[in-house]
Every structure is written in structure tokens, then in C-alpha cells.
Amino acid sequence: MRNISLFSQFFKIAFFTLGGGYAILPVMRNHFVIKTLLIEEEEFQEYLSLVQGMPGSLAVNCATFIGYRLKGPKGAVIAVLGSVMPSFMVISTISYFFAKIGENPVVMRFFMGIRPAVVALILYFAFTMARKMNWNLTKAVFLIIFFTLFLLFRINPIVLILIGVTFGLGYSWYVLREAKK
């Protein structure tokens, strides 16, 4: 894959996907895992696990991993540039005209209409990833616990991620220790 091709793929994905990180991830998955077969499904899921616990944009972090995987450090930079350039261009253009069109009813209805589509993309992605996961009782129990903590007690997702990492490391340590016996 050539550098310009890598840049243009990320540019197109970022330019034509509205809704931020969770909306762009299924499009990235579809392109790099299903359509072009450049990334394996398990590898993409590992990237998702990593980027969700990292600071910064999900889409940019995922682009970094994919770019690095495909073309090394230079590919990571190219992928990041391709994924942030559309947002930079659109935000620059919108900020220039926003004072004039921001209160326009047509523009407001446009953005209101995008919201359900973004939610649908996120839900589709969540269900697709859940189906691909190798489920067991431990993962199901953790899912229920974390979902309940988030809904009932409004615990910050970052705190839940850190708790999940801690429990995951502890569980892995336990499984490895038991396997050595």
C-alpha cells in the first residue's frame, strides 16, 4: 500500500462519517477488516480495547494503530493526518460561516436529523463487536456489573475502564497461576 493510498483511505472515511469516534469505528472496521482484509478481526478488537483506555480521540488513536500496523511509524503519521484533515477543514469552514448560518432553521434541522443516524451506527457497532467477542460467564458478569454501575450510579466511564483493567489483569494473573499448577 502506498502512502497516498493510506492517507486517502483515512481521509475518505473521516470526511464521510459524521458523529465522532464511535460512529467512525464501524466504518474503519468495515473498510480495513471486511472490505480490504488488511487487518484481522481479532487485531482490530485489540486496537479498540487499547484506544478506549487512552486519552484522545478514538478515531485518531485507532488510525494511529492501523497506520503503524500497515506502514510503521510513517504510516501512523500519515493515517492520523488523513483522519484529522477532514475535521480540520470542515471545522474551519463552519467556524467562518457559523455566525451567519448557525441559527438557520434548516441547518438546525439537519443536525437534529443526523443524531438518530449516529446513534444507530454506534448501536450497530456495539452489537457487531459483542457478537464477535468470545463470551464466557466472567465477561458476561463484568458487563452486567459495569453497565449497572454506569446506569444506576453514574460512575465516570474512565473510572469503570480503570476498574476493568484492574480486574482484567487480576483475572489474567489468576488464570495463568492456575494453569501453572
Image (spheres, rainbow, N blue to C red):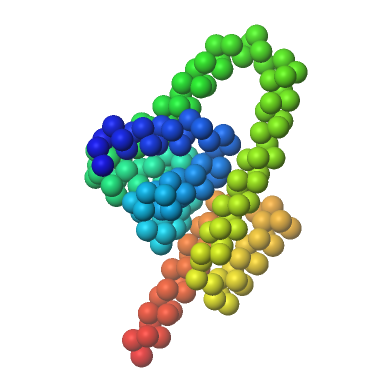
The image shows residue 60 at horizontal and vertical percentages of: 42, 39
Which quarter of the image is occupied by the N terminus?
top left
Mark yes or no: residue 2 visible: yes
Query: Quarter-wise, where is residue 178 in the image?
Result: bottom left
What residue lies at 61% left-to-right and 66% top-to-bottom? 143
The image shows residue 104 at horizontal and vertical percentages of: 72, 15
What residue lies at 72% left-to-right and 19% top-to-bottom? 106
Given residues 120 and 73, the one toward you in this image is 120
What residue lies at 75% left-to-right and 18% top-to-bottom? 105
Given residues 178 and 44, the one toward you in this image is 44
The image shows residue 10 at horizontal and vertical percentages of: 40, 36
The relative height of residue 80 versus residue 31 in the rendered view (above or below) is above
Query: Quarter-wise, where is residue 107 in the image?
Result: top right
What residue lies at 69% left-to-right and 62% top-to-bottom? 148
Give left or right: position of 10 versus 74: right
The image shows residue 103 at horizontal and vertical percentages of: 72, 15
Mark yes or no: residue 80 visible: no
Give left or right: position of 159 versus 112: left
The relative height of residue 142 versus residue 88 in the rendered view (above or below) is below
